Amino acid sequence: MSASAITMMIIAIVVIGGGLVVSAITLMTHPEQPDE
Amino acid sequence: MIRENWGTRVGFILAAIGSAVGLGNIWRFPAVAYENGGGAFLIPYLVALLTAGIPLLVMEFTIGRRFRGSAPVAFRRLNKNAEFIGWWQVAICIVIAAYYAVIIAWAAMYTVFAIGQTWGAEPETFLFVDFLGALNADGTPVGTFEFGEWVPNLTLVLAAVWIATLLIIGAGIKKGIESTAKVFIPLLFLMFGVLIVQALTLDGAATGLDAFFRPDWEALQDSAVWVSAYGQIFFSLSVGFGIMVTYSSYLKRKSDITTSAFTVGFANSSFEVLAGIGVFSALGYMALQSGTPVGEQVTDGVGLAFVAFPTIINTLPYAAGLFGTLFFASLVVAGFTSLISIVQVPVAAVEDRFGISRLKGTIFIGGGTALVSIILFPATNGLWLLDSADSFINRFGIVVAALVSILVVVWAVWKWAELRHDANRTSVFKIGYLWFACLGVITPLILGWMLVDNIRTTIDNEAGADQATLVYGWCVAGGALVFGVLMALILRRKDVPELIPEEETDLEATLTGEEETR
């Protein structure tokens, strides 16, 4: 694989996978308030 | 009547991911990315996700949760004149469900075929002639409207797909849809994960990945690449046809909207990237075996899933049956969770609007759609009927309905500020004027551009196309709109049950003040 392809693969995994991890962690660390 | 809620937030998010992750993630994204700049496509793709996909998800989640009703009811509560949008989306879902189910049935049969590679040495001939009977012996296609011959066993498998779908929907949100999502989505990621690991061990996988990820920066100067990125995000997120409005109508009043939208959006894109890695690893292996460039192996849709992959499976050095079974089972699971969400839209619509029970709604509307599907699509002309319906309902159904819904919500009834306030009240991540710019300006412009492009392409291709097929396609797409308008006119004097304004509930004290300033 070329260096540019490896770089883009890493960026894709880090940015998109990272977005998923960050948003999921944000949800988990802010528990849903129960309805009254 | 108390409206059913999701049992857990995870349940809602998994169900929404199950809806978004469908066949298109596996068989469309890899080819679209490759043809539009490879690794460089990541940039317009991310821009599209952040400026159109997630803003639209936020809008639909907020409409559903705020107005607590299926698409027609939610839009009616938004504005009396907007109910037609909901019914239009219901009609689109009925059309899509009718043909989408048969693709799942094909994949289910191929899951079994994969064990012994039943398709033989020529998967293309097997698919079009032996299995579907869509081509005559001389290679000419069976006429689109030549009804009469059914594909052996496919009708039974399709009926089984429908029975499973209706049983899950009939079981309700918590016991049916949520429980299914909690099992099927982890299972899908597990199966596809194993498949990717196996694909990465194949000779030539690195060549395939190089073709997929190598950036062509010049492509970013081409406007068509950007439109393709927005198209991919738009079609793969299940936005624009009532699904996310319906699903979020079962959210609790204090559920987080924006962070849920980010989670669903990024989960969907993560699966697409994984699919690209799996598919291009396998295509790289195929290119090595055939001694041709990877570019010559790239295809999408039915051709990728039911021709290219069986060809690859035929030549695998080990565990070919496992690889094939995992691939087609992944298609079945991805498609099935999407089908459930599509069928839920019309079932919930009649349930909410006419006050009938879930069971009756499932039997009459879900069963009716199943009947149409079973009569029309497992026949030898089913592939061509499906192809035309899919093309027209996507290009002139979903795109126009989404465009109209945004224009109505943001510009005609000017509800964006109210929705923004509602989303911000309970969400960790706050949205502001940037959301308005993305939703109200960027997304409609791109959708409008896509629509004009679609019309131009259709007119250009009209000369060589079969007139009856064109009429059929326009009837499918136009019929959905006519259905929406007629239903809204018929029900214009029939009010929906009053939604208790949140200001009158004791929730208000906790939902403003400290929540607003957090």
Image (spheres, coloured by chain):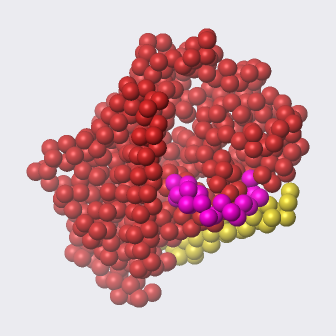
Viewer-closest of B23 and B153: B23
Residue at 55% from the left image edge and 60% from the top image edge? B223
In the image, taking residue B282 as reference, residue B355 lies left or right, namely: left
Q: Which chain is red?
A: B
The relative height of residue B382 versus residue B503 in the rendered view (above or below) is above
Residue B98 in which image quadrant = top left
Q: Position of residue B19 (x, y in %)?
A: 50, 50
In the image, taking residue B263 as reference, residue B389 lies left or right, namely: left
Look at the image and tell me in which quarter the N terminus of chain B lies. bottom left
The relative height of residue B488 versus residue B43 in the rendered view (above or below) is above
Q: Position of residue B58 (x, y in %)?
A: 43, 66
Q: Position of residue B363 (x, y in %)?
A: 34, 33
Residue at 57% from the left image edge and 13% from the top image edge? B136
Q: Is residue B510 magenta?
A: no
Q: Position of residue B205 (x, y in %)?
A: 83, 47
Residue at 60% from the left image edge and 38% from the top image edge? B301
Viewer-closest of B374 and A25: B374
Residue B433 in which image quadrant = bottom left
Residue at 71% from the left image edge and 24% from the top image edge? B123
In the image, taking residue B317 as reference, residue B211 lies left or right, namely: left
Q: Magenta part of the protein: which range? A: B212-231
Write down the colour of chain A. Answer: yellow
The relative height of residue B120 versus residue B351 in the rendered view (above or below) is above
The relative height of residue B66 versus residue B114 in the rendered view (above or below) is below
Prevailing secondary structure class for the magenta stretch in the rendered image: helix
Residue B334 shows in the view: no
Look at the image and tell me in which quarter the C terminus of chain B lies. bottom left
Residue B391 shows in the view: yes
